[in-house]
Image (cartoon, helix red, strand yellow):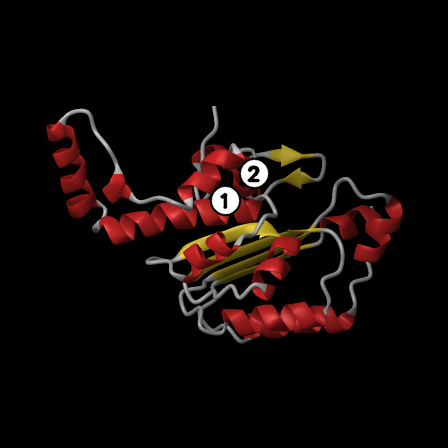
Amino acid sequence: GYTLTSTPAPADFGQKDAWGELPPEQVCLKRGGEFPRHGIEQALKTDLELAQASNPDDKKMIIETVRKELGGFERANSKLRVLGATSLFATNSVTAESIQAMNEAAEPFELNGPFDAAQKAIGMGLQLQNCAGLLLTGGGKMGGDFVQALGQALRPAHKLDKINLHFVDTEAGDSELAVWGNLEDSELQAWGKVCSDKAELTAVTLNCRCCKKLTD
């Protein structure tokens, strides 16, 4: 079956591929990407107050649970919508509905996905004030302009404590790997500025696994 979580599950730790051990966030990202698209899109439309139950007592129990254990309908709906939005992001898909869900998030969330999705989301107005963790992965150069725009979006993210950047493309040919082995200094400097501007960060990971292959 499929399991959808916004952060790594125990089974996501210790996974390996031909390059070595995989970050659990990346495994979580891949698992989320395998979740049926229809289910993810439905999560973006969550409204628990409209839930139906055949037994009136069951509906009463659901309402009480949402109010007492999930912080009320608004917060519970937001959690499920953000889960759908971040899972959609992991599949390299961004919509106006997913951007709205993340911008209106009631609680901090982690965002894991491809660089391409981040570039698209920033261009569509994604605000990251509630982002608590960011993992971006993929191949190809993003350019200093994108990195600077991402840095601007992260400025109000006072709960952000980790950034993981994984420049990987296991499907790439040698020519693509060579490109990644020579990231432009300006882009690396831009990434460095993004990280140095965030005093809240406790962990920054830069993983260029393609470069490792080139030097083996």
Q: Which residue is at a point 26% across and 36% down the rendered structure image?
A: 51
Q: Residue 152 appears in which quarter of the rendering? A: bottom right
Q: Is residue 83 left or right of residue 178?
A: left
Q: Position of residue 42 (x, y in %)?
A: 43, 39
Q: Residue 135 appears in which quarter of the rendering? A: bottom right
Of residue 32 and residue 160, the one placed in the foreground of this image is: 32
Q: Are marks 2 and 1 in contact (CB under 8 Å)?
A: yes
Amino acid marked by disc 1: Ser
| Tag 2 secondary structure | helix
Q: Which residue is at a point 77% across and 40% down the rendered structure image?
A: 171
Q: Please rate how many residues cluster around mark 1, counting C-alpha atoms within 10 Å: few if below 14, some from 14 to 19, many from 20.
A: many
Q: Which residue is at a point 77% across and 71% down the rendered structure image?
A: 185
The residue at which mark 1 appears reads as: 87
The relative height of residue 148 versus residue 183 in the rendered view (above or below) is below
Report the Cα–Cα distance between label 2 and label 1: 7 Å
Q: Is residue 46 left or right of residue 148?
A: left
Of residue 142 and residue 58, the one placed in the foreground of this image is: 58
Q: Position of residue 14 (x, y in %)?
A: 54, 35
The relative height of residue 12 versus residue 128 in the rendered view (above or below) is above
The residue at which mark 2 appears reads as: 33
Amino acid marked by disc 2: Gly
